[in-house]
Image: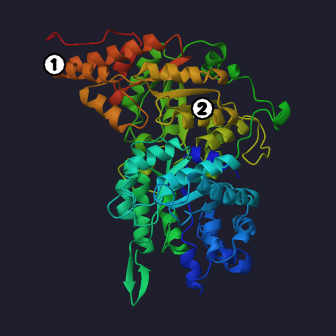
Amino acid sequence: MQDFIQAIADEHVYLFDGAMGTMLYAKGVFINKCYDELNVRNPEIVLEVHRQYVRCGAEIIETNTYGANRVKLRGFGIEEELREINIRAAELARKAAGDSVYVAGAIGPLGIRIEPYGPTSLDEAREFFREQAEALRDGGVDLIIAETFSNISEIEQCIAAIHEVCNLPVVAQMTIGTDGRTVYGDAPKVIAQRLDRARADVIGLNCSVGPDLLLDAVEELASVTAKKISCQPNAGLPRDVNGRQMYMASPEYFSKYAKRLIHKGVKFIGGCCGTTPEHVKMMGDAVRPLSPRRTFVIVERNGKNGEKAPGSEPVPMETRSNWGRKLAAGEFVTTIEIVPPKGPNPDAMIESVRSIKAAGVDAVNVPDGPRAQNRMGAIAVAVLLQQRVGIETVLHYCCRDRNLLGMHSDLLGCGALGLRNLLLITGDPPKMGPYPEATAVFDIDSIGLTNMASLMNRGLDLGGNPFGEPTKFTIGVGVNPGHLDLEYELRRLEWKVKAGAEYAITQPVFDVRLLENFLRRIEHMNLPIVAGIWPLLSYRNAQFMNNEVPGVSVPDDVIERMRIASDKGKEFALHEGVTIARETLSRVRDRVAGVQVSAPLGRVDMALQVFGEAEPAVSSRA
């Protein structure tokens, strides 16, 4: 299992467990008992709750230690058992989790007021938290979750204490009321900003209210932080039923809101008070189609201590394809991206690609179901173009639509069909396309797929088993220089390189400064970068790219240029879009290994104009 810090960085949406107290109460434990003490006095009942959540699909389970700090345990006269209670809780959770589920050490608030609202000093509070964090660390948890805090100053002391005793990742969750604020009046934006400064690795909300009331709060969190977001709502607000507080939100209701929360940016989702294994199962069923699964372990091209990885030695990149030859030689490569047709007739596309070959462009880039749209399969298109036009293709291949076995079979077929140049991507989720309820597979993400292709170049499957003659792929990956969380994007690129990436193609670049900063940050990787360039069609197209295409940033001055040109007319706008793209190409040419120019709406003529094959056209009405 990968380190949890990698889980934070990958693209998978992770599922926390649900309530522990609700389940223990349902099993007959009275609410006046110390639930944390059960880790020592009745461990089997705690272990069974953990196992129920694991069986229902939880990928992170929390230790039964929410109240296992010295202050709260003192109320039951068992504060001297603090260390044993926390360590035993971690061991029980690990026993249920095995090697495939993460264990989060749970720390809750002290239950007393700290300065300036009470007599307990910040230093005293930090010492209480430090004591519990040390015990959870020694118990072997994978991360620590500080949850259900209403006082930001208190959770800041908790986070500081955790950092003092260990390097474990920290998930920090506050709780808010029906007014969208903490009891001390802090709004989600303030929560996010202060937890960010406190060095929480994941920032989130839990408890108090149901999922509906947390939707807007989560959106507000995400607007001011690049940290990943977690959310564990209650099963609605409790209602008094015959003298008992009951949580009424059904598992089906929870599953619907799980989707909405993910669309708002939540990466770690689970339940708090009132939620059960059935809630977790239903959330898992809702989350699965929207989420790439975990990346398979990365097998580096050289093993530890520099020894060779198993399998055959890959053939030199310069012998695999002309694209690979030029990249290996440091020659500038050019490619134009065309979108496959929506129907079964490829004739118009093929004719347009003939002009690309005639212009001397090195390859044609073939996307694989971009933005989850219905189009002809990328593999079929790539074969048609290579056979009928005689031009090399760079085949996009995404993880969304095939399971692990299907991807392995497809790549073997690509090798047999002579498709040598790959761009491996995770793929846009179905929710972006016309059929948002379509099922996505996502057995692995682009890192795992890169690992697979690299192993196949050694004649091995993903399990390391030999299958005969190696494939001869030139392996590329996508990268986003303008990612909101650049550190996250850089970590993923590092892993892709370790997995076997040999070049990368960027998202469309409009802000050259972002690209220049990115290139400085990756100099040590020695990875050829092909810059994506998109000739804008209009002011509206510029706004769309800036606001609705993930990872693309269009500077204000470029948007203004397109507005002025569009006011003059469509042809002026097209002319200005090509001119801006040409300027971008001129500025990046000496900094990158090549460029990929998109043909927006199939306008191959515009892409060729960017390369200078024709002057940007404008009518005589100019």
Which residue reaches farthest bottom?
242
Amino acid type, residue under disc 1 in the picture: Lys
Q: Position of residue 330 (x, y in %)?
A: 63, 13
What kind of colouring is applied to the model shown? Answer: rainbow
Task: Tell me the SS state at disc 2.
Answer: loop
Q: Which residue is mark 1?
A: 568
| Crowd band around label 1 with a 10 angstrom C-alpha radius: few (<14), some (14–19), many (20+) | few
Return the residue nearer the eye: 146 or 385: 146
Q: Please, is residue 316 above or below residue 591 in the view?
A: below
Q: Position of residue 441 (x, y in %)?
A: 54, 54
Report the residue at 60% width, 52% height from top. 123
Task: Tell me the SS state at disc 1.
Answer: helix
- Lower sequence index among marks 1 and 2: 2
Report the residue at 56% width, 38% height from top. 488
Q: Quadrant of residue 72?
A: bottom right
Return the residue nearer the eye: 326 or 552: 552
Q: Would residue 548 appear left or right of 202 to someone viewing this image?
A: left
Q: Which residue is mark 2?
A: 419
